[in-house]
Amino acid sequence: MVGLIAERPWWGGGIAKIRTCIQVKRQQSVGAPVVQNIRGSLSAHEAGVLITSGQFTQAAVSEANDPQKVPITLVNGSQLIELLLQHKLGVQPVTLTHYTLKLDEISRERLEAIVEERSASEA
């Protein structure tokens, strides 16, 4: 578990600064107890964000979005990757060469000729 507290303008247009508790989990599945723990650690007027490299259980999503409680923002692994790509953080573009097979240019005679050429060059 990695955790930190950050004070940053909230996504509401940067109008007000809201102290935000961010907790990061490297787990395949994060359940409701983790959401409850982060909510319990918040003081008045703090927001909570929970990030995981995996997924959240349905119970965790329900707990985070409970209208009777302070909402907790959830960011799953797929959303995290999208954010990293969008902001070009920790990523590097790679150029790949793709090949397609041109079957109309392949004949039995052509393949036999290639095999004969290679056999002759190896001898």
Image (cartoon, helix red, strand yellow):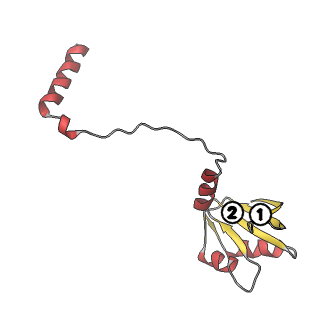
Label count reads 2
Name which quarter of the figure residue 71 lies in: bottom right
- Spatial CA span between label 1 and label 2: 7 Å
Picture residue at 45% right of the left edge, 38% below the top: 96
Disc 1 crowd rating (10 Å Cα; few below 14, some 14-19, many 20+) is some
Name which quarter of the figure residue 35 lies in: bottom right
Picture residue at 69% right of the left edge, 83% below the top: 66
- Taking depth in this image into account, of 8 and 78 the one nearest to the observer is 8
Disc number for residue 116: none
Left or right of 97 on screen, residue 83: right
Amino acid marked by disc 2: Ile
**Residue 24 horizontal/vertical position (percent):** 72, 60
Q: Which quarter shows the N terminus?
A: bottom right
Does 4 sit above or below residue 40? above
- Taking depth in this image into account, of 58 and 69 the one nearest to the observer is 69
- Taking depth in this image into account, of 7 and 121 the one nearest to the observer is 7
Name which quarter of the figure residue 48 lies in: bottom right
Disc 2 crowd rating (10 Å Cα; few below 14, some 14-19, many 20+) is many
Whether pointer 1 and pointer 2 mark residues with C-beta atoms closer than 8 Å, the reply is yes
Q: Which quarter shows the C terminus?
A: top left
- Provide the secondary structure element on which disc 2 rests: strand
Picture residue at 73% right of the left edge, 73% below the top: 72
Farthest residue, direction left: 109
Picture residue at 66% right of the left edge, 62% below the top: 52
**Residue 42 horizontal/vertical position (percent):** 84, 73
Q: Mark 1 points at which residue?
A: 22
Disc number for residue 51: 2
- Provide the secondary structure element on which disc 1 rests: strand
Amino acid marked by disc 1: Ile
**Residue 64 horizontal/vertical position (percent):** 69, 76
**Residue 109 horizontal/vertical position (percent):** 12, 29
